[in-house]
Image: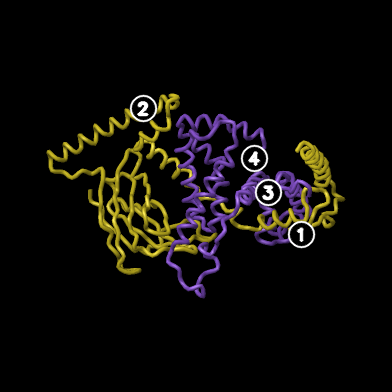
Chain colours: A purple, B yellow
Amino acid sequence: MEQFRPVHVVQEDADLALALREGDEAAVRALYERFGGLVFTVANRMLKDRHRAEEVTQHVFLQAWRNAEQFEPGRDFAPWLATIARRAAIDVLRREQRRPAGSLEVADLADSALVTLPPSAEQIETVWSVRAAIEGLEPDEREIVKMQHIDGHTHAEIAERLDIAVGTVKSRSHRAHRRLANRLSHLREPNS
Amino acid sequence: MEADDILNERVGNELGAAMSEQDNDPEFNAESTPEFTPEFTPEFTPEFTPEFSEEIGALLADPTLWDLPGDDLGDRIVNAISLESVNAPETYAALAGPSGRRSWVRPALLGAAAAISFLFGGLVLLSGLSGVEDIDSFSAKLVPTGLIGDQSGDITVTSFDSGLRIELDAASLPRRDNGSFYAGWLKTVDGDLFPVGTFHDGVDVTLWAGVELERVELFTITLEAAAGPDDPGQQSSGEVVLRTEINP
């Protein structure tokens, strides 16, 4: 959980941590702008429901505000917030699992109540890191990577939809995936 | 880690230069550039082992990794914190601790609390003298429209300087999932409709709105479905399940 973010970025968060500890509401907004999307992604990935994920995200930042004294400036916000998000999402899943059980024959396979094992902290770190890597792409690179992976479009189809040359699509895709590889290299197995 | 950093930097530099050349090279054969797939291991990124590629590729193909929170979520969070900071000064007194941190916050909040108490006391006194009902807090029974049955509930609306807090207790509402949910709405005397929040069941729901209580005449709960990409506006469905008039 120590390698969510580069060291120099962690250092930049020190001022933000101090402001948060002083009760500065502007610090909460800054914290949200920096980490809101990432916290939302963790919750959304676990709950598969954007509305409940927003509720969890709001809860996470309220908790961060209430417990700011527990946070030491100079440390990385990311694992702290990710841990709160994971616990909050697990609480939501547990509440749902306490709902009256119906017949398994009519159960929706997408029902989160059927999920018995919440993701590990390590899996959450991976999700967080991938989302952060996506956010770190240039907008034109991000668009192409999304069209490839989410929409399943080929380079030629992307080129046609964006009205750009296939070569441009390929070079941007190439560059984007290189960036992703570099930014996610800390997730590699040590000896792989 | 140092060796990895050096490797990543070298790979990045070499490829960055190579890609710049490719972008500017009219002879660059883009067709020879392989597409990235979870199974594909680019030869220029030794970090991407097949297993690693598969895991990352699966995550990149997960729509939840690309989804973004609503544009107003940041405002909602800051608003909730702002309201809490006014209404729970003891929380901050406790947080300040013996070290004296938040020294400027604590007296300010205690002062604000004292001022609110004074104003509240004055309002109570005035209402007692004039017979006018206290408008700082308003409770009402929610009436079913019959759309989904005869469920009912209660709300307590409390007015603060920065807006309204609406505490909802409607435990009998059946839970909504799989893209379906409830939304709370306030309608003003001017006919404006304000969304105050969404929820999946009616147990211990707290909603917030930046509307003056005096302007509100109606509170409703509607059935909603998650908006598709062609309907990002999230307008009210108009399918009201519970409602109550608000006449402070």
Numbered circle sitting on residue B39: 1
Residue A150 in the image: state x and y as whole percent: 65, 59
In percent of the image, x 32 and y 38: which residue is there? B161
Regarding mark 3 in the picture, which secondary structure is present there? Answer: helix
Q: Is residue B23 left or right of residue B240?
A: right
- Which residue position is annotated with label 4? A2
Between the C-alphas of marks 3 and 2, the distance is 47 Å
Neighbour class for label 1 at 10 Å: few (<14), some, many (≥20)? some
Do dots 1 and 2 share one subunit? yes
Taking depth in this image into account, of B192 and B104 the one nearest to the observer is B104
Q: Are marks 4 and 1 in contact (CB under 8 Å)?
A: no
Regarding mark 2 in the picture, which secondary structure is present there? Answer: helix
In percent of the image, x 48 and y 31: which residue is there? A21
- Which residue position is annotated with label 3? A140
Q: Is residue A147 left or right of residue B42?
A: left
Between the C-alphas of marks 1 and 3, the distance is 24 Å
Numbered circle sitting on residue B108: 2
Three-letter code, disc 3? Asp
Between the C-alphas of marks 3 and 4, the distance is 30 Å
Mark 1 or 3: in front is 1
Three-letter code, disc 4? Glu
On-image quarter of the N terminus of chain B: top right
**Direction bottom: furthest residue:** A105
Q: Earlier in the sequence, mark 3 or mark 4?
A: 4
Mark 3 or 4: in front is 4
Q: Are marks 2 and 4 in contact (CB under 8 Å)?
A: no
Do dots 3 and 4 share one subunit? yes
Between the C-alphas of marks 2 and 4, the distance is 37 Å
Do dots 4 and 1 share one subunit? no
Neighbour class for label 4 at 10 Å: few (<14), some, many (≥20)? few
Residue under mark 4: which chain is it in?
A: A
Three-letter code, disc 1? Glu
